[in-house]
Amino acid sequence: MIWSIAWKNVWRSRKRSLIVISAVTLGTIAGVFTSGMMNGWVNQRIDAVINTEMSHIQVHHPDYLLNNELKYTIPNYQKVITTLNQNPAVKQISSRIKVTAMAATSRGNTALTLQGVNIEDEKAIRDIHEKIVKNGGTYLGTEMRNPIVISDKTAEQLRIKSYSVTSETIDSLKTLGVPENIANKTGPLKNKRFKTEKLYKKALEKQFTKKEINEYGHHLLNAAKHYRLRSKIVFTFNERNGGLVYQTYRVCGIFKTNNTMFDQMNAFVLHNDLAEVADFEDKEYHEIAILLNDNEKPEDVKTNLKKTFPGLSFLSWKDLSPETALMTDFMDVWYIIIIGIILMALAFGIINTMLMAILERTKELGMLMAIGMNRKRVFNMIMLETIFLTFVGALAGMVLGALSIFITGKTGLNFSSVSEGFEAVGWSAQVYPSIGFDFFILVTIMVVVTGILSSIIPARKALKMNPVEAIRTE
């Protein structure tokens, strides 16, 4: 009976209850969507760490991690490979040699880590070949002698990337959804070449308003990009025995990931090309990358491999990218913080509403206590009213929040206007929100707790009433 009375009491002042419920609904939607967006970012970052940058586990000579000296290759390489291939938890492996080198063209220079890879193994474990930019060539699969795949950022540093406006550029802008009148404003820049992005942006500022650049600048930059494929890059590095080596590679492809730091540090060449010039023998590698069948088991597999090969270094992606691991472990705390702050703010409104309800029903409550309703039942009734009021709004908020995550999880949220800032720290500018069912269980528990805590002050107010004086209240 108490449950029935409490539910009916919620709707006695329909307008006031709906205002509170609406506030709780909007707050819950904000909390659910914010958490979903953050979770989507973290999941995408984990995916990038595993499938683009590092894989689940990496194997090295212990001393190689200290200063990356070329002589520290993996001992007993063939035995390690055989063991890994026989391990049912291992999905794919790829072996690499890595050389730190200075890259130079006639227009610029930068430092890079050359990764000598085997094409098919690397494609099976890493998705760099899927990150080749539009009109950016191919991933090492070419008849070109000494091919190299560099990043968009490296191409910019070596002045291999430039900007030019052509008829195709204008047509491309229109297909990207840029209004025809905006696309046509690039006409005065047609057939002009700009060596750097900075120079091109200055030219755009003369042709477009600030508002137009903010809205369409990303498309204007991407459509005008031009890469000088087949450009020569001269690399200088020390071969295995310490001698200085000069080697020329030709650009066959340009890639771009969501991590600017990774991009500007790495370039990819064929293993045989790099091994020959750096004086590496067959079956000598600095790194073995391991991709597992289960994302949840890298630590277990790492521990078992350490027992089998105690003289080697095995590092999981959490060891290699501790900041990403921290974000992953922090997600549950993040959920509690964001939802807790929202519910705490809403609790004050709920308390105020319930206090008003108590004051309006002073005579009624006095009569109920006078005819025998004990204090425990009065407390339970007020507590249930508060929980109902909170839970109805939270339930609606969770449903609408889940719906918004489902929709944006399919379409994605585009933050391309600030992509440079996101990618500088390894985060994608295109995020696909997602959330697990356990999150909604957590929110439900927090909502019930909030309802109980919010009911304490109004309930105490009611319990302090003198039934005789309350009945006399007009």
Image (tube, rainbow, N blue to C red):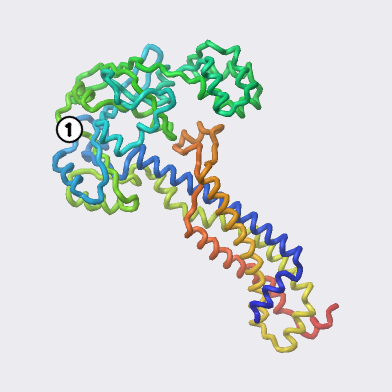
Q: Residue at x 42, y 30 (%)?
A: 256
Q: Residues within 10 Å of mark 1 (few under 14, many from 20)?
A: some
Picture layout, residue 40 above or below residue 197: below
Asked whether 372 or 136 is in front, the reply is: 136
For the N terminus, the quadrant is: bottom right
Asked whether 201 or 5 is in front, the reply is: 5
Q: Residue at x 38, y 33 (%)?
A: 130
Residue 48: percent from left, percent from top:
39, 40
Q: Residue at x 34, y 29 (%)?
A: 266
Is 251 situated left or right of 135 in this image?
Answer: left
Residue 348: percent from left, percent from top:
68, 62
Picture layout, residue 224 above or below residue 385: above
Label 1: element kind: loop
Residue 41 visible to the viewer: yes
Is 170 situated left or right of 303 in this image?
Answer: right
Give the residue number, with chain letter if any, for mark 1: 284
Asked whether 133 or 72 is in front, the reply is: 133
- View extreme (right): residue: 474
Residue 474: percent from left, percent from top:
85, 77
Quarter occupied by residue 209: top right
Picture layout, residue 455 above or below residue 280: below
